[in-house]
Image (tube, rainbow, N blue to C red):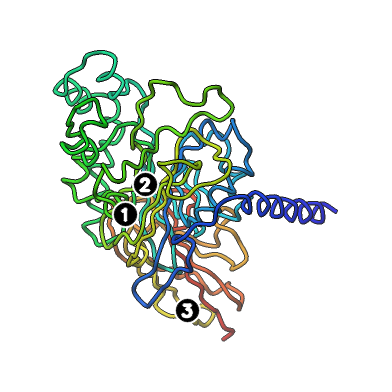
Amino acid sequence: MKDEKLSIRSCMLALLLLMFTLIATAPISLAAEKKTNKSQMELIVMTYNIFAGGSRSTPLEIAASIKFANADIIGIQEPAQSLPGLAELLGFYHNERMSILSRYPIIDHGDKDFVYVEVEPGKVVAVSNVHLPAAPYMPYQLRDQNYTVDLVIRHEKTQERMNGIASRLESLPKIAEKEIPVFLTGDFNTPSHLDWTEEARTNHYGFVVEWPISKKLEQLGFLDSYRDIYPDPVAKPAYTWTSGLPGREPPIEPNEKHDRIDFIYHAGPVKTLDSQVVGESGPYSDLSMAKWPSDHRAVVSMFEIIPVDKPWNISPDKRTYSSGDPITVSFNGSSKETDWIGLYHVQKRSEEGSIQWKYASSNTVIPSLHKSEGVVSFTDTASLSPGIYKILFLADNGYRVLNEKTISILPN
């Protein structure tokens, strides 16, 4: 009976989600069928601040707006506790630590700055997501506090926003240098130097500002996907702040400073094919819905990418063994001395207990100095019954599976 109730509930949610989607204007280009070939594929990435976990709307409306954008990977800001429910509505994977929803499996290998998304079997991209502090918001300081441009830049270089992204500015370029596609989504709460230009100064109180975070990302080789397609900030201001707070009257303050503060940056083997702002009907939305559920417009971009092999690999010396044969497993990509390799019955989950296990660093149950590659051997195999087993590569004394392979044991 429980399974029947879950099935009925899932069908009802799917029907409601379809109803909400049908009220939206159909996307023009990003909803097209994605093409793939042996090395390249197309991927649609979205950044979306949903305002306090969607508290001014409903989960169905938030999910419908994501479905409308046809996004594969979504960096969510202000998720509150909404990610599991949104993932269920969409049939997606989710990662709460990085606030990401994904059509494809997410591999959380423990790095504080990013996760991997397995966009094809065995092939990954790296994804990071940020929500930088909202205050003090420097366009308001220019408007209201008589700040000079020099003072604004000093604040931006030294205050919480730069500190909030500092580790990513160090780690993500190193990932891109390895020819891994890297995406950085977020509500940055700071504008772009590509917008506050000489040509566009009349849109920004007459100021030209080299905003430090966007400038630094550019220097590190990251590209702004929207400006890849629309480089002219006068013709396409593409303001993501603000669409107005749902349910408030008036939804937008009379003297509000509109700006573009939500971005999708990319580096590595990535090419932007299209990019659009998604929001309510109006001059700043490229794609519009009849009812937009957030105070931020979203950005959705289509990319051509070349995904790479998983950075962690294990390779047993054979795929078929006789009972009693030693099982030797080569590995590479270990990042900590406490990464480990376990031998499991094929039906067991990682946390349910291995038959045998060893640290990758030492080939024993006691860790030693870290090494990124090496060999682990399981020699006590005489008692293993014939059947199918799996070998798991697991991260840092935990149960996050980095890679797995299956083997067979035959009777003597």
Q: Looking at numbered disc 3 in the image, what kind of residue is underneath it?
A: Asp
Q: Which residue is mark 1?
A: 182
Q: Looking at numbered disc 1 in the image, what kind of residue is underneath it?
A: Val
First in residue order: circle 1 vs circle 3: 1
Percent position of residue 254, x then y: 42, 21
204 or 189: nearer the viewer? 204
First in residue order: circle 1 vs circle 2: 2
Percent position of residue 400, x then y: 48, 52
Percent position of residue 2, x then y: 81, 51
- In this rendering, position of residue 74 left or right of residue 25: left
Q: Which residue is mark 3?
A: 325
Q: Residue furthest top?
A: 145
Q: Looking at numbered disc 2 in the image, what kind of residue is underneath it?
A: Ser
Q: Secondary structure at mark 2?
A: strand
Q: Which residue is mark 2?
A: 128
Q: CA distance from mark 1 to mark 2?
A: 8 Å
Q: Indicate the quadrant containing the C terminus: top left, top right, bottom left or bottom right.
A: bottom right
Above-or-below relation of 10 to 179: above
- In this rendering, position of residue 249 left or right of residue 364: right
Q: Indicate the quadrant containing the N terminus: top left, top right, bottom left or bottom right.
A: bottom right
